[in-house]
Image (tube, helix red, strand yellow):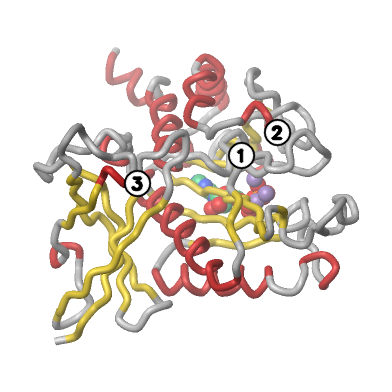
């Protein structure tokens, strides 16, 4: 038997953006535990904005298990928060009720700032560093500083060791700003891995005395970029059938549902989606081929391939909840009849 360190991880009840929480318990197993091996656990919801009335017990239900390469015999246990009965999802548990579909693929591009001493990593104590230009995909100490690359590399290795589908890294447009991409098949799978990747990044940065700033416009109304979490998506139908007519109906439905999307695309998005800095205004839907100033960017490959493939919704922001973002995209898609559903109804 081996003693494993089980880190139970969940989302708390803070609004508008939940925080990641975690605590450890040690259990003995013959080999690396599977989901079925992991018991329910509890925590004090009164300390996480999840208490219900006078009873403060909440239940943690394991839903995904990942190896934790940062610890000897470490296990990352992603959990849903349940009511004391262990079966009713807590009101803060959004994952329990989202739409899912294994044929729907999501690629999230998480942008964020490293923050130290209350400002982006590499910003001087007073004033500003040289303006944006050289930082995006930049190389060299004056562009990326002494430590950021070490962190993003370590984060990549932690994600890969955990089996998380981390797909890539780039330094972003503002100084101290970076991006990584996570791809997954199914909204739960993709969003679970994004939350775990966020957790690993935040935990890793503790030893560097650096925080992750996920706010979508941390430097306010300046010429410094904000942070998004572009959501690239495709369904089985979009990849294999698609077509111009279906695409145009789909875009019309995205236009109609504009406010439902914005409601779950992250707080303060009006401060980011201003129409400047390669963004579309938050309150007007648009789409365009290879257009980085549109709400939805249509890749060249999509048009060339007879309107088949994936689309990029550029509006979700860096603080958005990937569960709710993916679910809203699937909801809008589900409202547009496909040729299969049209002929079935006829
Ligand atoms: P850019 O910065 O040019 O917008 P990235 O390379 O950062 O592009 O991100 C592209 C994303 O698109 C990746 O996360 C990738 O996984 C995702 N993607 C590619 N093909 C598909 C697909 N068929 N369905 C869903 N997402 C996809
Ligand atoms: Mn990108
Ligand atoms: Mn980017
Ligand atoms: Mn993008």
Badge 3: few (under 14), some or many (20 or more) residues near its Cα, within 10 Å? Answer: many
Q: Is residue 37 visible?
A: yes
Residue nearest the observer in this picture, 267 or 282: 267
Lower sequence index among marks 1 and 2: 2
Lower sequence index among marks 2 and 3: 3
Residue nearest the observer in this picture, 315 or 308: 315
Q: Residue furthest front?
A: 54
Q: Are marks 2 and 3 in contact (CB under 8 Å)?
A: no
* 83, above or below 254, in the image: below
Q: Nearer the viewer, mark 2 or mark 3?
A: 3
Residue nearest the observer in this picture, 294 or 44: 44
Q: Nearer the viewer, mark 1 or mark 3?
A: 3
Identify the image quadrant of residue 323.
top left
Identify the image quadrant of residue 28.
bottom left
Lower sequence index among marks 1 and 3: 3
Q: Which residue is mark 2?
A: 289
Identify the image quadrant of residue 280.
top right
Q: Look at 20% across and 82% down and name the residue there.
A: 3
Residue 319, horizontal then vertical, whole percent:
54, 42
Q: Look at 15% across and 56% down and name the residue there.
A: 40
Q: For the image shown, how many numbered marks are present on the structure? A: 3
Residue 327, horizontal then vertical, whole percent:
39, 34
* Secondary element type, mark 1: helix
User: Which label number is shown at residue 188?
Assistant: 3
Q: Which residue is mark 1?
A: 302
* Secondary element type, mark 2: strand
* Secondary element type, mark 3: helix
Residue 203, horizontal then vertical, whole percent:
48, 65
Q: Residue furthest bottom?
A: 1
């Amino acid at each position: 038997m081996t003693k494993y360190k089980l880190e139970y991880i969940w989302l708390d009840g803070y609004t508008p953006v939940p925080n990641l929480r975690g605590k450890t318990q040690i259990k003995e197993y013959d080999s690396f535990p599977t989901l079925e091996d992991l018991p329910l656990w509890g925590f004090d919801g009164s300390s996480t904005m999840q208490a219900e009335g006078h009873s403060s017990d909440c239940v943690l239900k394991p839903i995904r298990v990942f190896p934790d390469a940062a610890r000897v015999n470490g296990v990352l246990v992603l959990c849903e928060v349940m009511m004391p009965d262990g079966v009713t999802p807590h009101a803060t548990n959004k994952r329990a009720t989202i739409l899912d579909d294994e044929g729907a693929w999501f690629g999230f591009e998480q942008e964020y700032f490293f923050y130290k001493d209350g400002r982006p990593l590499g910003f001087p104590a007073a004033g500003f560093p040289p303006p944006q230009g050289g930082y995006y995909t930049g190389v060299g100490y004056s562009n990326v500083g002494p430590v950021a690359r070490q962190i993003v590399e370590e984060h990549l290795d932690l994600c890969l060791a955990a089996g998380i589908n981390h797909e890539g890294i780039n330094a972003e447009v503002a100084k101290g700003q970076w991006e990584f991409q996570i791809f997954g098949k199914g909204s739960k799978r993709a969003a679970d891995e994004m939350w775990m990747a966020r957790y690993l990044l935040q935990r890793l940065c503790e030893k560097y005395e650096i925080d992750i700033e996920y706010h979508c416009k941390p430097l306010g109304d300046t010429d410094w970029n904000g942070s998004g979490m572009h959501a690239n998506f495709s369904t089985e139908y979009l990849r294999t059938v698609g077509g111009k007519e279906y695409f145009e109906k789909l875009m019309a439905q995205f236009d109609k549902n504009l406010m439902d999307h914005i409601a779950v695309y992250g707080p303060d998005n009006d401060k980011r989606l201003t129409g400047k800095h390669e963004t579309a205004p938050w309150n007007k839907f648009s789409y365009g081929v290879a257009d980085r100033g549109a709400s939805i960017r249509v890749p060249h490959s999509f048009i060339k391939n007879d309107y088949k493939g994936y689309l990029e919704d550029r509006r979700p922001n860096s603080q958005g909840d990937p569960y709710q973002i993916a679910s809203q995209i699937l909801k809008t898609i589900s409202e547009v009849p496909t040729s299969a559903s049209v002929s079935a109804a006829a």
